[in-house]
Image (spheres, grey):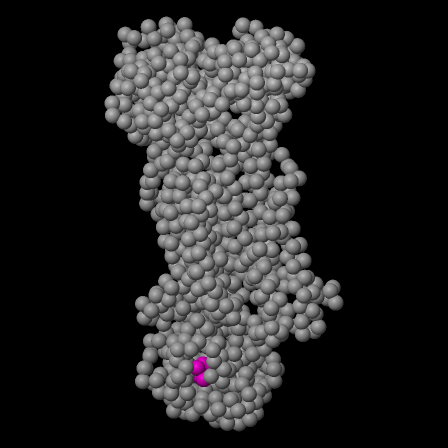
Amino acid sequence: MLQIENVSKTYPGARPVLQGVSLHLDAGETLALTGESGSGKSTLLHLAGALDGFDNGEITLDGTRLSRLDDSGRAALRRGCVALVFQQFNLIPSLTVAQNLSFHARLAGRQDPAWTKDLTERLGLGELGARYPEQLSGGQQQRVAIGRALAARPALLLADEPTGNLDETASNAVLDLMLELVRDSGPALFLVTHSERIAARLDRRAHLSGGRIA
Amino acid sequence: MIGAACQALASHWRRHPLQLGTLLAGLALATALWSAVQAINAEARASYARAASQIGGATLDVLEAPGGPMSRARYVALRRAGWQLSPVLEGRTRLGEEQVTLLGLDPLTHPPLPAFEAAMQADQAVLAQMLTQRGLLLAPPELVAALSDVPGLPPLRASDSVPPGMVITDIGLAERLLARPGQIDRLLILPQQPMQLTPLDQLAPDLQRRASRAGADTARLTDSFHLNLTAFGLLSFAVGLFIVHGTVGLAFEQRRAMVRTLRALGLPVRLLAGLMLAELLALALVGGLLGLGLGYLVAAALLPDVAATLRGLYGAPVAGGLSLRPSWIAGGLAMALLGTLAASAQALWRMLRMPLLSAPGLQAWAQRAAQGDRRMALAGLGLIASGIAALGLVKGLIGGFALIGGLMLGAALLLPPILAALLGLGRHLTRGPLGEWLWADTRAQLPGIGLALMALLLALAANIGVGTMVSSFRLTFTGWLDQRLVSELYLTARDDAQGAEIVRWLAPRSDAVLPIRAAEFTVQGNPVTVYGVVDHPTYRDNWPLLEHGPDAWAQVNAGQAVFINEQLARRADLWTGDAVQLAPGWVLPVAGIYSDYGNPTGQAITALPALLAHARAVPNRRFGVRIAPGAVPDLIEALRAKFDLPASALIDQAGLKSRSLAVFDKTFVVTGALNLLTLGVAGFAILTSLLTLWSLRLPQLAPVWALGLTRGRLARLELARSLLLATFTALLALPLGLALAWVLLAVINVQAFGWRLPMFLFPLDWLRLFVLALLAAGLAAALPARRLYRLPPSELLKVFANAR
């Protein structure tokens, strides 16, 4: 599903963030990437999601070699096979909850109303469809973000500290729900976290330190 | 504590230099256009005052006859009674091709006159020469140059002390040139009077004594023009303040977190507000000074055209040079400071009332603005209603401008709610996810860009309104010229004798020779030029009558009635069927009203014999010649060869029309320039709004990019968004502009110039303006869009950074 081979990344005027990182993730598998702040976890996740380019190595996603894609090719890949969940939720503030939920799926041309409805109910968002993101709590916003990501039926779900902004109770509830939905809908999950407790709940884990897999 | 707080506040501008530049540019532009107009007005008014002092007697009381001029016999009688008086005769007349104000006075009794004294310093013989039979005309150097080849004029002498557009001479010569023999307009009451004189109210109870109003007439006549300019200046100032309001509001919003931190650290909110106020005033001072510099340059560039307009339209003496006045600098800076305070008051007030733990963010800002939509709509409707009510309650120009002000500001306030409704409608009609997002996101951006769009609305409406007025005026004026300038050739003879000779020579060589003869009279205290015409189909078939009674031409040609121009009709409230007294014992009914554009004073026409019966020595030197158009060049050659006439004495119809149109076009150069500048400022307002919103846009655009849109597509959508808003704004500006045009044509023009014009529509001009508006909005959006297109993904990814 996802093959990361010997990837390096350096931002201009800064020290190398990633140095020869290799990693793989099978279809339907869940992987937790841990590491201290500044170790390059989020950068690796962004590279895997075709959000940014890398300097060396290769990343293959669902058979597509990312180094060969231009800007629009990467955008098409993000639309078609990747979905993202961020710590800050990053919902679209001008759209309602219902519109946010279906936005990615519609953008990808894969809207499945029954699946979206099912997701909405399972995420407990049925009553909130007409509200705007700013009218929701943090836990509710993250559930919308997860719903938006899964409604598109991606092959790979990338989650960057998805519960980092939530208290422990909300964090557990959101994580339970996300793992349950991932298992039911079948995408691979690549989750970045600094929490050992969360990492322990996924199939596999990798640790990044100083830009290298430890 | 204060130093640390200042350092923290100033750090915002260091981190946002573009925002600082925008704020200063907004202030500078607002101040520049306002102060440019003020500089022009101040210069013109100073010229009027200078002219008043140059022609002397400005502080003396005067004696006038209420119904018009008095006879020389009255003057002589008063002098014999011991009163020390000095007679003055003043009128507008044409010398060659120049319309001038001719001031006739008695050099021996008139109080010291700077123009005389300067001329006599150069040549002692000036006084003697002026009193000779041939006489002497004192005129400003540029007028002397223009009149140098006019045949039949007395000797000319240049003097810098004579106001522009004025000619000073002895009253005897003035009587002849104005064709008003034996008439005196006013008597200056000299300061030194013998003891025990019979009081004037006993000697001449029919004459009125009043304080001097030298210069006041010109000021009154040109008030409407200056009021027009001031209104434009205010509009430009308001448009500039939109930029300031938007930038200050955004800067305060972005500094909410800092303000909360400073307050949490123990800085009192009042001290903080005071510091921010001081910061704003310092910025206003810098922006105001920049604006003054810019305004000076704009004023210097526009003043020559304004001076030409004022001279041409009103005969007002205005020099073309600009001087720097302390009052102008103080006024400009005061406007910059007051404008900044007005534009920042809301943001400062909000800062003062902000709870310590209030959350920052664009959404809160947007939400508040959205809540204000309804209030704005109500205020807008209220302003429009007030404007309409003001027109009914306050007559005159003030009422007209109150209507314009209410209409424009009210419509500007209505714009955001209307745009919000349109965008909401668009969203409901759209199906695709991107379309939905685009409409919804555009709606969410309205609070940020709304003020700039209001500025665009005002600028476009002003362009449409003023453009429609000017084009309607031009179209009417062109048609009117076709009616008024019917003769194929216009000629000016050197003197009456040559005139008679030319008429005899032309009789067998032309279809008709129509004398153009006129004399000055006074109607209700104001000068009126009465033309005497011969009975000829040229007049009957072409004269631009607005209204007339039965058998009008027959009565006029019989000398039993007059036609009067629209200005005189409106000013004196004289209409068809009313009687008008042109001179003592000469009362005629008004047979009709005719349009007479470009002439500020009253005019009347009647039969030539009737005129000659009431005015002596009416010059007979100007003629219109009817001839086949193809024969005109040969006739001009023949006339020049036969009578040795200079080129300026023979003008064909096309030449005269193009000259008149050139004068007309020059009149509106200033409004055109201010129009364009205002549109430029509005375009700049959009650019600054988009640039200052840039940092707030990234968190909204990054998620959409992450979900699979390229930066290029997002940039194109950003461009489309600006074009969409500009399109809506331009469409809404059209009815507002047409309403403005109607007010200008039906209310302001009537009050200011005394004529009402028909309103024509110019869809091609609208299309051009529409394209220009889209171009301005497109250009303004192009820079942020290009920035987005070239933004490295790493910058967009910072939006998702967990430490953000």
Residue B384 location, x and y as percent?
42, 53
Q: Determine the image quadrant of residue B499.
A: top left
Relative placement, left or right, of B109 versus A158 is right
Residue B399 location, x and y as percent?
45, 44
B518 vs B490, nearest the viewer: B518
Which residue sits at x=37%, y=74%? A107
Residue B151 location, x and y as percent?
46, 11
Numbered marks: total: 0
Residue A145 magenta:
yes
Which residue sits at x=52%, y=70%? B364
The quarter of the rendered structure image containing the C terminus of chain B is bottom right
Q: For the magenta stretch, what is the residue range?
A: A141-146
Using the image, determine if residue B723 lies above or below residue A89. Answer: above
- Magenta segment main secondary structure: helix
Q: Determine the image quadrant of residue B668.
A: top left
Q: Determine the image quadrant of residue B94.
A: top left
Using the image, determine if residue B284 lies above or below residue B538. Answer: below
The quarter of the rendered structure image containing the N terminus of chain B is bottom right
Which residue sits at x=46%, y=58%? B379
Relative placement, left or right, of B22 versus A100 is right
Using the image, determine if residue B740 lies above or below residue B642. Answer: below
Residue B749 magenta:
no
Residue B40 location, x and y as percent?
56, 37
A201 vs B153, nearest the viewer: B153
B262 vs A207, nearest the viewer: B262
Using the image, determine if residue B782 lies above or below residue B534. Answer: below
Which residue sits at x=46%, y=40%? B397
Asked if one can make out residue B416 in the rendered structure from this viewpoint, the answer is: no
Asked if one can make out residue B48 in the rendered structure from this viewpoint, the answer is: yes
